[in-house]
Amino acid sequence: MCGIAGSINFKLSAPVINKAMGHRGPDERNAFSDNNLCFYHLRLSILDISGGAQPMHLDNRYSIIFNGEIYNHTELRERFNLKGNTHSDTETLLLLYRKMGASMLNELDGMFTFCIYDKQEGTIFLARDRAGVKPLYIYEDGEKFVFASELNCLKALLPLQKKEDAFYHYLRLGCFYRTHTPYKNVSEMPGGTYLIVHLNNLDKKETRWWNIHPFYLQNQKRNLPIEEAISHTDHLLHTAIKRRIDTSDLEVGCFLSGGIDSGLVTSIANQYKSQLKTFTISFPGSYDEAPLAKQVAEKYGTIHHEIGLSFDSLRDDVETILANYGEPFFDSSAIPSYYVSREAKKHLTVILNGDGADELFGGYRRYVPFAKYDFFNKSSLMKGLAGAVSSILPNPKDKKSSYNFIHRLASLASKSGVETYLTAGVDILEGFEKWIIPPAFDYLLPVKQDFTKITGSPISGLAKIMNMDFDCNLFSDLLVKMDIATMAHSLEGRSPFLAKELLEFAPSLPDSFKINNRKTKYLLRRLSEKYLPHELVNQPKRGFEVPLKSWVNNTLRDMIFDYLSDPNALYHAYFRKKFGSLLLERKLKMPEEKRAKVIWMLFAMEVWNKKVYLQQ
């Protein structure tokens, strides 16, 4: 795990890069330049510590900088008879590229962004892993081309300007959609893509080398008995976890929540790693998952670390945590993710997590109605009836109640088009869109274009929302959250559920293996019966949840009110007059949970504006 930066027609500054993202590579820093090309690499040494230094070169022709891990690289060396001078997966990439070119990407099980310079061809080859686990941001203005692992690095290197149009995505989605960022001329490279850029004229060609959608098309054809599917998933998880333990010269541990995803990872990892260390968060109230996590730790005899959080220091830390992301970041679970990563780093450098299991195996409660009915293709009669019902139902008070589920279902059924997805998903300003000052363009057009392609394909309603969540929620939110939270502490996170084989197997499974009646993640729950205490098997989804209402109304109230009451606050440019004051004073007819989400979304945006964008 590392940080990378590169440029064409632009001189990189090592001190600036070190200051902006030195946390990504505290062990070694090296530069390389040739004509108008510059490379810079910051290394967190994990595999082949003595022989894996970068930039790495081959045949006086190829040079590479690489962020990530290739978990099956030793298997690939054997299969393709690759002979090298080190045991590094970085060298494996160079050897594969020399042998196969871009087609090598299909063979890789890993998380990666890398750039290979071909001196003979005068090109660079930039590639990103299937899901987009490892980040890459690109600045281009027609004269220069600059890339880096973090937005804050590009901001430090270049005089970036705010891209006002992109903030509408953030207001509705809680993130910047896919390639979009808060800056002009800066885009995020999509997962599953590669880019070839010519050094002499900056001509480029982007290719989508992997897409999850074709694998969802297969679930209409696969006829697999459930027991066989469970057994095969078990085998693939074992392979993925073993690879992620074996490809580390340092100790590997596990994040452990009270849910089945991290529980499965821990139970299987324990078979390949003795004295496994596990980490969970404990804090008072209904959000405490520690007792369930402790049951798994005791069952497998792990060296368990229960991190008690009172959030007493949250006032001092929250601005720093949010500023780390380099863009407004809505997901409040970034806070506990930051703290648990900080604690884990005190004990080790590599940590396994359960990311991706919900999106691949059907872990969200909102998936249940889509398994019964395709809400993306509903009749006008249903929409009208649902709209009438939704308008008269009082607001729910408890987001986990059955009534809240019914209320959201009625609201969902009353929507059409991409509004259906937004209501089913993050649901920030849905029902209150009228307060947004409408721009002179369709700001949701990029979302609608992808939405139309997916919902117009011959797959089920459940497959459609899971496909959208993989492309949007996982890519633009959850993977960003974990990368920044861990790397802020020079900790490497590894996600076994996002292994190559699982990414290509899980989408093709029948819907009933994911949602069965009202039971989410049915196949994984069946598998967990083999590994986990009975009390955990049927528990609802767990994660690093937070008491957001308490933060907004108590812990951080004064700080948040100061930000949002500022007449120069950024959000005023996007909302009708008095929206902020009405929101803060509870004069909008809005459920408390939703109000807390909206306030947090605006707060994160203002912290970015003040602590990142306006900072020199």
Image: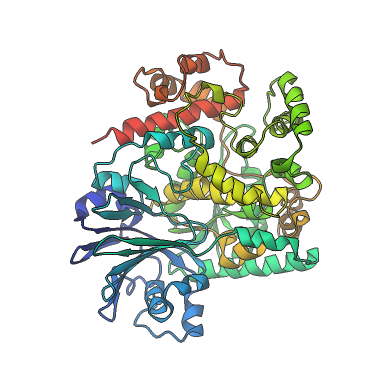
Question: Which residue occupies the extreme front position in the image?
Answer: 440
Q: Specify the quadrant that holds the C terminus.
A: top left
Q: Nearer the viewer, residue 295 or 467?
A: 467
Q: Is residue 328 left or right of residue 400?
A: left
Q: Residue at x 77, y 44 (%)?
A: 373
| Residue 145 in view in this figure | yes
Q: With respect to residue 402, does 276 lie above or below? A: below
User: Which residue is at the front of the view, 282 or 70?
Assistant: 70
Where residue 189 sits, quadrant-wise, is: bottom left
How far from the left and from the top, in percent, is residue 331?
51, 38
166 horizontally vs 75: left or right: left
Q: Nearer the viewer, residue 174 or 576?
A: 576
316 displayed left or right of 586: left
Q: Position of residue 259 (x, y in %)?
A: 65, 48
What residue do we see at 38% from left, 39% from top? 182
Position of the N terminus by quadrant: bottom left
Q: Position of residue 179 (x, y in %)?
A: 44, 48
The way the protein has been coloured in the rendering is: rainbow
**Can you give x and y, in whole percent of width and height, for residue 533 in the image?**
73, 54
- Please determine whether, in this image, residue 404 is positioned above or below residue 16: above
Query: How many numbered marks does the figure carry?
Result: 0
Task: Tell me if residue 488 can be seen.
Answer: no
Q: Is residue 79 left or right of residue 51?
A: right
- Quarter of the image for residue 512 reads bottom right
556 or 78: nearer the viewer = 78
Q: Residue at x 76, y 37 (%)?
A: 379
Instruction: Name which residue lies at 25% across and 79% down.
Output: 60
**Is residue 502 depicted above or below 23 in this figure?**
below
